[in-house]
């Protein structure tokens, strides 16, 4: 299929610091349930919303390429890393719409990101051109009414992804590595090997 013939395109952005099996599971879930022709995985460049320093972009890009290698409909795209200044989804969406002018677009995210969606730059424009595809992360301490507030607006089109709960956290992985335990059960073998080879996450940047 020609890249210009894609009719259903997903964007999946994040720090991927490091990418893990939960990210991979969400990508596979989105591709299957949204019937995507292509899912762009987009490691962030300069993250405007992150208070901590991210691992060097070339490391995160390399790990993402290894993490999603088994997904033939995934393209790990470095445009947000190459872009100067803060990374904004609206800019990426506008660029990809130029390449896939006839496609239906989806923004793939977790429920935590969805709850912050209205803080994103030009979120109304994003919502007018794309549907949010949200993987819910239920918590016994959450009030269901509160967790639904983010999508109770007609401006925001949403689809809930029916994804088995996979409690994997990049923050937890980094913490465990600093404590001397590489959580191989949460990492693809190639990513685990890369982390060891480059001695990543041995010092705290949180």
Image (spheres, rainbow, N blue to C red):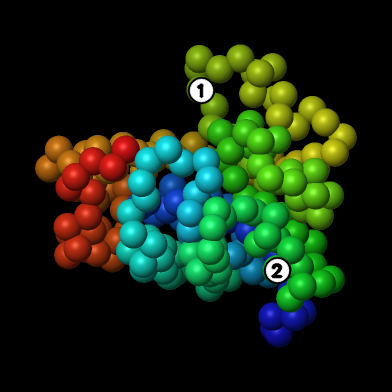
Q: Residue at point 23% right, 41% down? A: 204
Circle 2 Cα neighbour tier, 10 Å, few/some/many (<14 / 14–19 / ≥20): some
Marks 1/2 in contact by CB < 8 Å: the verdict is no
Residue position marked by numbered label 1 in the rendering:
139
Per the image, label 1 sits on a secondary structure element best described as loop
In the picture as drawn, the residue positioned furthest to the bottom comes out as 2
| 89 horizontally vs 122: left or right | left
Q: Using the image as rendered, state which of residue 96 and residue 193 is in the foreground.
A: 96
In the picture as drawn, the residue positioned furthest to the right comes out as 154
Which numbered circle lies on residue 193? none
Tell me: residue 80, above or below residue 128.
Answer: below
Q: Position of residue 64 (x, y in %)?
A: 41, 63
Q: Position of residue 182 (x, y in %)?
A: 19, 47
Q: Using the image as rendered, state which of residue 77 and residue 94 is in the foreground.
A: 94
Q: Residue at point 51% right, 22% down? A: 139
Q: Position of residue 25 (x, y in %)?
A: 48, 52
Which numbered circle lies on residue 96? 2
Mark 1 or mark 2, earlier in chain: 2
Q: Residue at point 69% right, 80% down? A: 3
| 62 horizontally vs 156: left or right | left
């Amino acid at each position: 299929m020609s890249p210009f013939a894609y009719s259903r395109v997903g964007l999946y952005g994040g720090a991927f610091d490091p990418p893990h099996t939960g990210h991979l599971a969400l990508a596979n879930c989105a591709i299957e349930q949204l019937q995507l022709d292509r899912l762009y995985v987009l490691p962030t460049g300069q993250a405007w919303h992150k208070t901590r320093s991210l691992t060097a972009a070339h490391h995160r890009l390399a790990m993402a390429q290894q993490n999603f290698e088994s997904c033939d409909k995934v393209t790990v795209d470095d445009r947000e890393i190459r872009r100067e200044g803060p990374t904004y989804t609206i800019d990426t969406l506008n660029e990809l719409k130029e390449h896939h002018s006839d496609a239906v677009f989806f923004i793939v995210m977790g429920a935590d990101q969805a709850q912050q969606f209205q803080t994103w730059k030009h979120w109304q424009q994003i919502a007018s051109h794309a549907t949010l595809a949200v993987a819910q992360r239920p918590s016994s301490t959450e009030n269901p009414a509160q967790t639904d507030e983010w999508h109770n607006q007609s401006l925001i089109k949403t689809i809930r992804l029916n994804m088995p709960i996979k409690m994997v956290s990049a923050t937890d992985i980094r913490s465990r590595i600093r404590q001397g335990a590489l959580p191989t059960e949460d990492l693809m073998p190639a990513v685990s090997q890369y982390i060891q080879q480059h001695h990543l996450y041995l010092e705290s940047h949180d």
